[in-house]
Image (cartoon, helix red, strand yellow):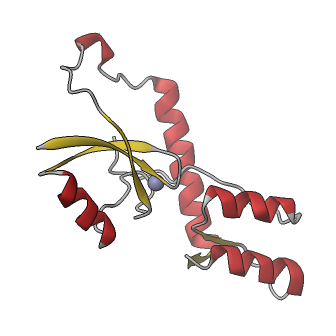
Amino acid sequence: MIKYNLKCECGKTFESWFLNSNEFDSLNKKKLIKCIHCDSSVIKKSVMAPNLPRKSNKKSVKTKEEKNIKKKLLNFRKYIEKNCRNVGENFTREARSIHYDKKSSQGIYGKATPEETSELLDEGIDVATIPWVDEAEN
Ligand SMILES: [Zn+2]
């Protein structure tokens, strides 16, 4: 078994175990490895994690403030899901078409890479990246 630090296109990292490096390559080729943060399958192998026992004082204790932020983000997510159209992977195209054709004033949301997002911003298209929190994640 081998542990890899994986890096997603959203910029977040997470860890996962694989039988060997070949297993990682073949799973990743089939897009079977998904980001635990945003569900994207554009995953890169990061530096291998040193397999040290976790120090007990490093246990993540969520502060009240963190929980409040999470709650706000959850509410924000619910608001967006209710009021905006999910265009998924077509986000960049749809955002451009709304901006240039002015065909719809309805908000949209979907997936874009950080590169795509900065391109849109360069073109004067108003996009925002928000953390997409999951209720289950804790
Ligand atoms: Zn991600």
Q: Which part of the image, by quadrant, shows the C terminus?
A: top left
In the displayed structure, would residue 100 be above or below residue 109? below
Horizontal relation, residue 67 to residue 102: left or right:
left
Give me the residue at 85% from left, 60% from top: 122
Residue 102 visible? The answer is: no
Give me the residue at 55% from left, 58% from top: 77
Q: Which part of the image, by quadrant, shows the N terminus?
A: top left
Where residue 42 sits in the image (x, y, percent)? 44, 62
Which quarter of the figure has residue 54?
top left
Where residue 84 sits in the image (x, y, percent)? 64, 73
Horizontal relation, residue 73 to residue 133: left or right:
right
Which quarter of the figure has residue 78?
bottom right
Residue 39 visible? The answer is: yes
Horizontal relation, residue 58 to residue 37: left or right:
left
Where residue 106 sits in the image (x, y, percent)? 75, 78
Where residue 25 sits in the image (x, y, percent)? 27, 61
Q: Of all residues shown, which one is farthest toward the top?
A: 57
In the displayed structure, would residue 2 be above or below residue 56? below
Give me the residue at 80% from left, 85% from top: 104
Of 68 and 27, the residue lying toward us: 27
Q: Of all residues shown, which one is farthest toward the front?
A: 22
In the displayed structure, would residue 30 be above or below residue 102? above
Give me the residue at 79% from left, 83% from top: 97
In the displayed structure, would residue 108 be above or below residue 122? below
Number of marks in the image?
A: 0
